[in-house]
Image: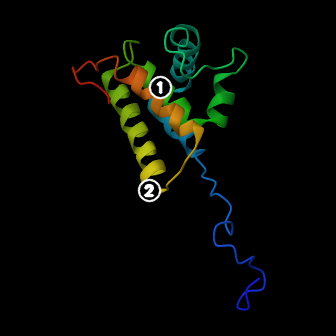
């Protein structure tokens, strides 16, 4: 306790709990760009085709794409953005997903100072897969 504020413990290091950030708006933003059937297909493609090769971020077989989107929206975005390359997804859609991912990661990390395993995993997926496939325009996503 301090004389000025009897409710404070006086410990400058433990006065505040970690901030919790809400990214639930990503669900609508992702669906507006790519549509649910394509997003679901890309997520399932990641689980079946990519995890065995790039297994840095495994997903349980019984995890549905919608449940995963609700639980880890930034990682879901990284997965569908990174696996949209070489998947008959239009270059415009790939670019929109990549731009959204960069914006979300930039805001989360630099503006909000967020720290989470989800963000680290999203960066891993993006670095392992996103840079492995060129956009139709010949540019690489990094």
Residue assigned mark 2: 111
Total tally of numbered discs in the picture: 2
Callout 2 environment at 10 Å: few (<14), some (14 to 19), or many (20+)? few
- Mark 1 = which residue? 125
N-terminal of the two: label 1 or label 2? 2
Q: Which mark is residue 27?
A: none
Q: Mark 1 touching mark 2, by CB under 8 A? A: no
Q: Residue at x 53, y 12 (%)?
A: 45
Q: Quick one: 10 or 61, which is closer to the camera?
A: 10
How many residues crowd around disc 1 within 10 Å: few (fewer than 14), some, or many (20 or more)? Answer: many
Query: Furthest residue to the bottom?
Result: 3
Residue 1, relative to residue 66: is it above or below? below
Residue at screen point 60% across, 44% down: 24
Q: Secondary structure at mark 2?
A: helix
Residue 104 picture location, percent across and down: 45, 44
Q: Position of residue 22 (x, y in %)?
A: 61, 50
Question: Dividing the image into 4 quarters, which one contains the N terminus?
Answer: bottom right
* Separation of residues labelled 1 and 2 (CA atoms): 22 Å
The answer to whether one can see residue 44 in this image is yes
Q: Can you give x and y, in whole percent of width and height, for residue 130 in the image? A: 38, 24
> In terms of image quadrants, where is residue 136?
top left
Towards the viewer: 44 or 119: 119
The image's colouring method is rainbow
Mark 1 element type: helix
49 shown above or below 128: above
Residue nearest the observer in this picture, 119 or 136: 119
**What residue do we see at 51% from left, 36% from top?**
120
- Residue 137 placed where, x, y %? 22, 21
Q: Is residue 19 above or below residue 3?
A: above
Q: Residue at x 52, y 39 (%)?
A: 119
**Which of the image's four quarters has the C terminus?**
top left
């Amino acid at each position: 306790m301090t004389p000025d504020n009897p409710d404070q413990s006086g410990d400058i290091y433990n006065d505040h709990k970690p901030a919790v950030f809400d990214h639930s708006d990503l669900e609508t933003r992702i669906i507006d760009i790519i549509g649910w059937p394509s997003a679901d297909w890309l997520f399932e493609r990641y689980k079946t085709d990519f995890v065995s090769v790039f297994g840095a971020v495994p997903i349980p077989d019984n995890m549905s794409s919608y449940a995963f989107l609700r639980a880890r929206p930034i990682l879901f975005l990284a997965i569908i953005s990174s696996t949209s390359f070489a998947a008959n997804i239009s270059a415009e859609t790939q670019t929109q997903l990549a731009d959204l991912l960069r914006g979300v990661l930039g805001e989360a990390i630099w503006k909000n100072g967020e720290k989470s395993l989800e963000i680290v995993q999203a960066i891993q997926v993006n670095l392992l897969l996103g840079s492995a496939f060129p956009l139709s325009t010949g540019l690489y996503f990094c």
